[in-house]
Image (cartoon, rainbow, N blue to C red):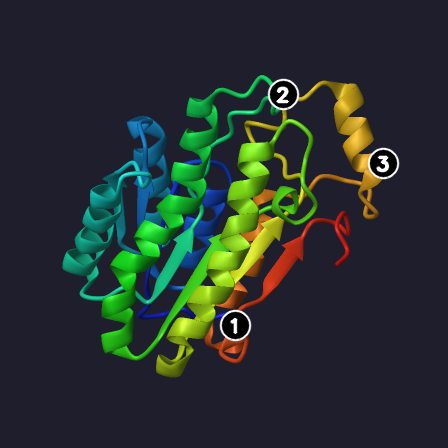
Amino acid sequence: MIDLTGKSAVVTGGSRGIGRAIALRLALQGADVAFSYRGNAAAAEETAAAIRATGRQALPVQADVSQPEAADALIKAALEAFGKVDILVNNAGITRDDLIMRMSLEAWQDVINTNLSGAFYAIKAVARPMLKARGGRIINITSVSGQAGQTGQANYSSAKAGLIGLTKATARELASRGITCNAVAPGFVLTELTQDLAQPLQDEITSRTPLGRFGTPEEIANAVAFLASDDAAYITGQVLAVDGGLVMM
């Protein structure tokens, strides 16, 4: 069984969907969890209450990680509350889908800033404390869109592909101090975003997925919890696809 007793974690974008499932799973395995949210205070408080119900500490922090000072403040708040950060999960992400010809420059920049730069800012903020502690786990949530590309998602696919490069560079830079950095690449997962997709599109997605169904947020959280644990101490610089076989590299 995965044991994170005594560990402290930071999850960006942790109030809903996959981020919420990750925050809860880490807490269930014994970690105290700080998480960021952009604006939905009610969802953040509900998630914090669910974490506390496991007997662990929860620290919701309103922060837009696309701003470097907000990422710094998030890590600082976690360090002040818990004394250390053992695990960082970069999950915060947005979509602004459109075809390249129609995509606004703002839609391009907003997605890059949040999904890619936001992860860089959080890693930069946590690197020094992890180096001093001579250990840590960094897990970046990328996507099958970053591995295979997706029509109408030039911004999102680019950011998620960039996140894979950031994962590998971080893994190389920090390995000498026992810090690992890996990525999890979800396929199509049932969340608030995808449950509203038209039925024909849902049917097309499941027909393209060898396992024939959508994933669940909990299945993504399972992979994150493993990579955050001592069981994954010799794994770094890897991309673990949790996608029902959609993208086979």
Q: Nearer the viewer, residue 34 or 117?
A: 117
Query: For the view shown, which residue lies furthest in the left direction?
Result: 80
Q: Are marks 3 and 2 in contact (CB under 8 Å)?
A: no
Tag shown at residue 33: none
Depth order, front residue of 67/106: 106
Residue 107 screen position, x and y as percent: 46, 24
Residue type of the residue flagged with mark 1:
Thr
Residue count near mark 1 (Cα–Cα under 10 Å), binned few <14, some 14–19, many ≥20: many
- Residue at the image point whose x is 38% and y is 64% from the top: 30
Q: Which is nearer the eye, 139 or 249?
A: 249
Mark 1 or 3: in front is 1
Q: Quadrant of residue 249?
A: bottom right
Whole-angstrom CA distance, mark 3 to mark 2, is 18 Å
Residue 200 drawn above or below residue 188: above
Q: CA distance from mark 1 to mark 3?
A: 32 Å
Horizontal side, residue 166 vs residue 136: left or right: right
The secondary structure type at the circle numbered 1 is loop
Point out residue 219 in the picture as x, y percentages from the top left corner. 61, 51
Measuring 67% from the left and 41% from the top, which residue is drawn there? 149
Mark nearest the camera among 2 and 1 is 1
Secondary structure at numbered mark 3:
helix
Q: Which residue is mark 2?
A: 196
In percent of width and height, residue 213 lies at: 77, 40
In the picture, the quarter occupied by the N terminus is bottom right
Check disc 2 and report its element: helix, strand or loop.
Answer: loop
Q: Earlier in the sequence, mark 2 or mark 1?
A: 2
Res. 207 mark: 3
Mark 1 = which residue? 236
Residue 219 appears anywhere in the view: no
Q: Residue at x 58, y 17 (%)?
A: 102
* Quadrant in the picture for residue 196: top right
